[in-house]
Amino acid sequence: MSPPGPPTPDPTSAPLASTSATSLSIWGWGSLGLVLFLVTFGPFAIFYFAFYIVCFVGGGFVVTLLFGKSNSEKYLEQCEHSFLPCTSVGIPKCVEEMKREARPIKIDRRLTGANIIDEPLQQVIQFSLRDYVQYWYYTLSDDESFLLEIRQALQYALVQFSARSKETDWQPYFTTRLVDDFGTHLRVFRKAQQRIAEKGDQMKDQAEELVDTFFEVEVEMEKEVCRDLVCTSPKDEEGFLRDLCEVLLYILLPPGDFQNKIMRYFVREILSRGILLPLINQLSDPDYINQYVIWMIRDSNCNYEAFMNIIKLSDNVGELEAVKDKASEELQYLRSLDTAGDDINTIKNQINSLLYVIKVCDSRIQRLQSGKEIDTVKLAANFGKLCTVPLDHILVDNVALQFFMDYMQQTGGQAHLFFWMTVEGYRVTAQQQLEVLQSRQKDGKHQTNQTKGLLRAAAFGVYEQYLSEKASPRVNIDDNLVAKLAETLNHEDPTPEIFDDIQRKVYELMLRDERFYPSFKQNVLYVRMLAELDMLKDPSFRGSDDGEGESFNGSPTGSINLSLDDLSNVPSDETVQLHAYISDTVYADYDPYAVAGVCNDHGKTYALYAITVHRRSPNSEETWKTYRRYSDFHDFHMRITEQFENLANILKLPGKKTFNNMDREFLEKRKKDLNAYLQLLLNPEMMKASPALAHYVYDFLENKAYSKGKGDFARKVPPLIQKTYSDPDHCRVAAPIDDNVDDNIPLRVMLLLMDEVFDLKERNQWLRRNIKNLLQQLIRATYGDTINRKIVDHVDWMTSPEQVADAVKRFRDAFWPNGILAETVPRRDKAIRMRTRVAGKTKLLEVMPDELKHIIGAETTRKGILRVFEMFQHTQLNKRMVYVFLERFLETLFPQNKFHELFNKLHSRSKQMQRYKQRLHSTQAPSLQKR
């Protein structure tokens, strides 16, 4: 065990001692400093010191708070960008834009570069925005910037549209594409009518069946497109127009404006539903088209005969009932009038006219409702005695000749007819050549051998083609005459009359041989020929005898003019004989009517012809005198030749004379000529051939003052309407008609329209060739070789600023009359619309020139005109034509934008197109399987 060491000190005692010593020193020094502070600054200094400390601490706290907030926001922003999705900034920006002051938008009012166009266009834009946008927009906001931006977008689109229009050549569109599309539309309609006629289904709705069949034919003809949905479904039509307007806005608007969906949709709806759709609906309305047709030919007066023909040919019960109701209303009004004196005769005439109209309407309605429609041609072929047209008239009439030509081809006698026609052409040509030869010989020029050589070659050509042993077919004629002709050709110079003997024999053969002309008169082609010559009337119409007490006898003082349809009251008894002759010529100072007060001279000098008339019947005999001026004869002649066109080639009235027409010698000569005219007119054969002619003759020879007025033989019916404001047959009408026609714009257009309207391609090519030559002569005689230049100038005029401005003004006035949006026009009453149809057809038939009837035939002309009119009576078909024109317009205006493919896609949902593809696939599948 070790010894104890020195004592160890406590380890905690030293620190405690040092701490206490430090504390005493701090307090000491602190107390000393406090005493010195109080002695130096005074007792109030402690309060200032405390205030300074509080301010220092508060300032430090504020600085720390602001610095921490700033750092926190920066850190939060970094976190949002790094880990959180983006927040929407549209609302703050929108609020910021709304707080800003509106900047004025400057709009350039120039659109097309022509002030006369820009002014009405600006008005259209203003009216459109006012009536389609502003009326609801101002309920949401007063800010004008949105409206101004829409206006600016519209103006920009119009500027681009105008620039494209100026760069486009419109001449092919107006002279080719427009006509081709119309011709194609008419061809589709004609084929649809033919297909329905072949079906013969009377049970279905014909209008609906026609529309369905029309679009079936369209898809067969177009191959790639069918517009049935757009034309028959309002919903699909609106969708089509929206898509089309959106495409146009894509082309015309700047990319920035097009990407603005709100503005784009507004502009699209304004264009599609506010402008295009109402415009297309109006242009497609049949009633609007009918009113426009009547307005276009307003200067033409409705002819009574044309009106009655329309009534008798109408197959629409609604038309007939509307006319009948209006006639009954007018009849009731006339019967309520209290008249006396001369007015009573006028009232009676009008009453009789209305009664006849009602009777015709009743008969036609009964026939249509019974379903016993009668073919006039077939009925006439078995009805009584037909008019006889001599062979020499047939051979010189283009219309009649084509039917005789068809018949001769059927019987194998075409060689005789063609020989006769060829000889006629040779004779005319030879005479012209010889006349030219004689005139050149007089001038000292000698080309005798050359001309005679040409004539000899032509004569030998006729001989070889029809008379030689090698001819096929050969004209069978007397061999002696043929041998004599051959000898003449070999030894003598040919003359224009070299074929006359043989031609005369061929004519007699065609006239007397039972195979030719005699049998032709018994053939249905002869009846059709009479119909085309307007010498055949429907004999099936017989008015009932259930009249209302008034007479139906026709004369200017008794009733209306009877047509050949109603002969029951015409005094056509063969036992009644009428004879008349001019017994004397007197001057006007001898007034045979002065005592009766019927006729006055009015200070004029003219001659009167005293006509003695004998009328003999089994029970009585009458004789009287009547007095007529030459002008009365002339008016009467115009009336009967207008009603019976076949008389124009038979009856020849003496010509007029302007000077010295009161000379005694001249009056005697005219008296003889008029006497011959009367005797020919009263010939029994003439009266038998045209039974209704007797009515006109009796009226003319009656002992009374003659009532003039060509075409007013029967009193006119009162107005019935109120005034209102591949296989060529299965392809489009787009190919040139002929190689030498396509460069002649008017000839091409006229031939194309005549082909489709009158169906000339179904007729023989001889007629079509003659029509073509006639049109060429007409065009050259009228315009010469400058016609194409004039047409181009006319197209330039149509697209000139003045005409475009006029079109824009008409559009503005139609939609906004007097600056106010036009209200929707209420649909007119059905009866008024039906009477408008009748009036439109009547005016169209009346305005057709007689020359056209003489070229292609009266029946063909009538059918063609009525076919075109009927085509416009279907809203769906009219829409199809409007959309076709619009599509071609856009394809012409934007040739680089492939609008053709676009339209094919827009119409691809067509049900008819889908069915057509299925049929095409089903027909091609078997052939593919065989391969």
Image (tube, rainbow, N blue to C red):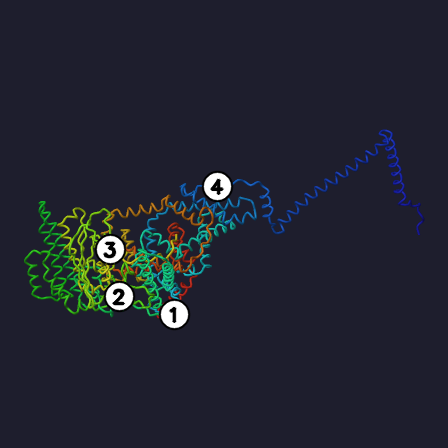
Closer to the eye: label 1 or 2? 2
Which three-letter amino acid code belongs to the residue tagged 3? Tyr
Find residue 107 and name its label.
4
Q: Badges 3 and 4: C-beta atoms under 8 Å apart?
A: no
Sequence-wise, the earlier of marks 1 and 4 is 4
Q: Badges 2 and 4: C-beta atoms under 8 Å apart?
A: no
Query: Distance between the Cα atoms at labels 3 and 4?
Result: 74 Å
Q: Residue 215 vs residue 584: left or right?
A: right
Q: Residue furthest right?
A: 3
Find residue 203 and name its label.
1
Which three-letter amino acid code belongs to the residue tagged 2? Leu
Where is residue 841 drawn, in percent x and y?
A: 33, 58
Q: Badges 3 and 2: C-beta atoms under 8 Å apart?
A: no
Q: Residues within 10 Å of mark 2 (few under 14, many from 20)?
A: some
Q: Residue furthest top?
A: 40
The residue under label 2 is: 567
Which three-letter amino acid code belongs to the residue tagged 1? Met
Find residue 706 and name its label.
3
Sequence-wise, the earlier of marks 3 and 1 is 1
Which three-letter amino acid code belongs to the residue tagged 4? Ile
Closer to the eye: label 3 or 2? 3
Sequence-wise, the earlier of marks 1 and 2 is 1
Nearest to the observer: residue 673 or residue 925: 673
**Looking at the rendering, which quadrant does residue 311 occupy?**
bottom left
**Looking at the rendering, which quadrant does residue 915 occupy?**
bottom left
Where is residue 54 drawn, in percent x and y?
A: 79, 38
Q: Residue 175 vs residue 473: left or right?
A: right
Q: Can residue 756 be seen in this snapshot?
A: no
Nearest to the observer: residue 741 or residue 771: 771
Which quarter shows the C terminus?
bottom left
